[in-house]
Every structure is written in structure tokens, then in C-alpha cells.
Image: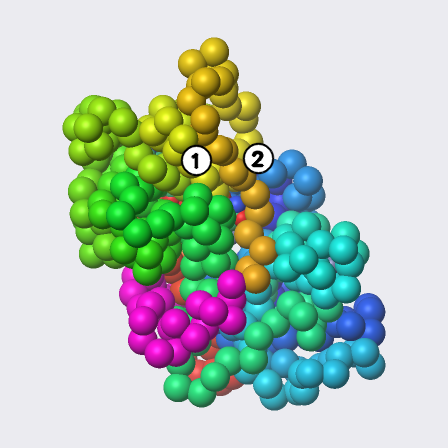
Amino acid sequence: MKALVYHGPDRKAWEEVPDPEITDEGDAIVRVDTTTICGTDLHILGGDVPEVYAGRILGHEAVGTVVEVGDNVHRLSPGDRVLVSCISACGTCRFCREGRYGQCLEGGGWVLGHKINGTQAEYVRVPYADTSTYRIPDGVSDEAILMLADILPTGYEVGVLAGGVRPGDVVAVIGAGPVGLAAIATARLFSPSHIVAVDLSDARLKKAMEFGADITVNDSHEDTVAVIKDLTGRLGADVAIEAVGVPVTFELAVRLARPGGRIANIGVHGHPAVLHLEEQWARDITITTGLVDASSTPTLMRLVNTGQLDAGRFVTHRFSMDEFEQAYDVFGDAASNGALKVVLTRQEEGADK
Ligand SMILES: NC(=O)c1ccc[n+]([C@@H]2O[C@H](COP(=O)([O-])OP(=O)(O)OC[C@H]3O[C@@H](n4cnc5c(N)ncnc54)[C@H](O)[C@@H]3O)[C@@H](O)[C@H]2O)c1
Ligand SMILES: [Zn+2]
Ligand SMILES: [Zn+2]
């Protein structure tokens, strides 16, 4: 089969590799029908996630069709259309029992495209397939459901739920990429008084308004702290969500929160960020950070299915799988082309391009 293989920082190629095989009786082999690229893949290519070795197939999001299941898979059969979550879960370890699938102790968690081969491929081996995939209801498009593989649960769980967004809150979201926009869209479910989106790209800020932000701030030439102070009687935001993954935005998020406020870090960080405890120690703040569990996937699927959450609108660009290089170029240069999620779809055998 063909797959997108990581060859070290800044190097990748769509190339011929061996087909995946069932290696554990809980595995399934899924034919990837639709996959996408995540900001985290850019962090990997930037060298920020050193545990990803050269030779790894990238990707941790997919919608596909089950082609083969191991002897210990009971809830899936060949032909089933499934969402492959970015988080795999053994389902039985201490953390999985608590719904903390991201922290799975038995080889689950974020493993796809990280510790084992991922979904940017024609086929993928999914471990613990019963508890790491979701059967897809009829009537919902592959593209919309694909947004539940990572960005929507991430924005919702690691941003909105961890940050404890409540009705009436002022919520600052730093980073209006797909994950920040997912946080904005799901924060709206809680009726905050204002959502302030912060980014360096006007194109992304325009998207933020479409996804539910009330105010936008371009931090390259506007004073974000002053905007938030003016809005909140000098207090600061109730919740500041960091959805970029660089030190300066984490440090900004901490400065934006009011006394007693909450800072929810979502970003994947490759460099140390400074926590100015000498300024913050007396301010009663709560800082959360973590990996998505994707435990909210069934809830989000219901919201998508009933039309309360429009997941399909994240998709801006479409490619076939042999166009991975272009897709990465477009996704990596989102500031100039307005890209949010780029979707790569399997070509039907024998179909013309
Ligand atoms: N914690 C988790 O489980 C988890 C899961 C998925 C993704 N992530 C991380 O979430 C982050 C966002 O993902 P994404 O796919 O939306 O990434 P992205 O790269 O598409 O978007 C990041 C956005 O931040 C903006 N930005 C960059 N520097 C900025 C600055 N100094 N100030 C304000 N805005 C700035 C960019 O213009 C862009 O719009 C990434 O770090 C990704 O790795 C974390
Ligand atoms: Zn991701
Ligand atoms: Zn587990």
C-alpha cells in the first residue's frame, strides 16, 4: 500500500510500504476512506515531538471501512463504516475505566501516527478496535464525522470542559486554527457572554467570527491584554484557552485570566514556557493541560447528527491521497490560503483523477 512516511524533521514522502497486518487479537485493519492533517503533524515535522521516529506513518484521524478483525474483536465486522479516533483505548486499565483514554496504560492513548503507524495511509492497523473506533450513523457525511477524530473532542474536552466554561463567561481563545475554532464552536453551547478570538492571521480571525467569536484581536498589532481588560472591567477573562502550542501564547493565556480564572492549555509544546509564579502566585488561578481523551465523541456525534454542531464547515480543501505533499503545503500555509482542515480521500480503484 502507499502511506505518508515521516523521515525526520521537515522530511516526509508518500511511498510504497508493507500492508499492515493484525498483530494482536484486538486489532482491526481499516481501509482509510478519508483522512486529514493536524497541527500536531506540523509539530512532528518541526521536530517538536521527538518520540516519533523516522519511518513512522503519520496521521491520527480517519474515517474508513473495516476490512479484517482479530479474534478478540466482538463489536465490529468487515464492511462496517467507522470513525478511527486519534485516541486508542484498551478499555480496561485504571485510566480507561475513568474515561481518561488519553492516559491508557496498556498501549492505548495517542499512539496512531506517534508510537505506531498512523492513518495517512491506504490502510491502518487500529489496536483495541472495539474501544478505539465508533460506528457511524447513516446520513452523516464522512467529512463531518472526520472532524470528531481529533479537533472537536480536543477543543471541547481540553479547552471548554477543562476550562469549565459557564454561562455568562468571557472566554478568550488564543489560536483560531481548527482546534481553537472547535473550542469556540463548542464554548457557544454554554452561552458565554463573549468569546474573544486571538490570532496573528486576519483570515483565521474572520473564520473565528463565523464559528461563534464575538470579538477578534490580531495580536501582531493589537494589545490583547488591553482588549480583555476593557471588556471585563479590568479583571481579565473567566477562561483563557491556549490553542497554539508556543511559549508566548501560553504566557499570554496566563496573563489574560482574571483572579480565580481558569487557563486551559491545549497546545502541544516543544519548548519550555515560563510560568511567572512571582506575578501569579496570589491570583487563585487554575491551569489545566492534557491530552484529549475523546471520551466526548458519542456526545459530539449526537450533536452533529441532530444538527446542533456543524462539523462539516471545518473542511476547506479537498485532495486525493496521492496529493499529500500539496495538502501539507496548503495546510502549512493556512495564513495565506484560508485553509482549515484539508481532507484527503481514497480514490476509487480504476477512477480517473
Ligand atoms: N492537547 C491535545 O490533545 C491536542 C490535540 C490536537 C491538537 N493539539 C494542539 O493544538 C494546537 C492547535 O492545533 P491546530 O490544528 O488548530 O493548529 P494550527 O497550526 O492550524 O493553528 C494554530 C493557530 O495559531 C495561530 N498562531 C500562531 N502563533 C500565534 C501567536 N503568537 N498568537 C496568536 N495566534 C498564533 C496561527 O495563526 C493558527 O491560526 C496545536 O499545538 C496542536 O498540536 C493538542
Ligand atoms: Zn491531532
Ligand atoms: Zn487503557
Secondary structure found at label 1: strand
Q: Position of residue 191 (x, y in %)?
A: 27, 55
Q: Quadrant of residue 195?
A: top left
In the image, residue 43 sits, relative to residue 320, either above or below, namely above
Mark 1 residue's CB less than 8 Å from ligand 1: no
Q: Position of residue 205 (x, y in %)?
A: 22, 44
Comparing marks 2 and 1, which lies closer to the viewer? 1
Check the image and tell me how it is coloured: rainbow
Q: Left or right: 330 with respect to 7?
A: left
Q: Residue at x 78, y 58 (%)?
A: 93
On the image, numbered disc 1 is attached to which residue? 263
> Label 2 to label 1, Cα distance in Å?
26 Å
Q: Quadrant of ligand 3?
A: bottom right
On the image, numbered disc 2 is attached to which residue? 47
Q: Is residue 304 magenta?
A: yes
Q: Left or right: 32 with respect to 218?
A: right
Q: Residue at x 39, y 33 (%)?
A: 261
Q: Left or right: 308 with respect to 109?
A: left
Q: Quadrant of residue 81?
A: bottom right
Q: Amino acid at mark 2?
A: Gly
93 and 177: which one is in front? 93
Badge 1: few (under 14), some or many (20 or more) residues near its Cα, within 10 Å? many
The residue segment tinted magenta is: 296-319
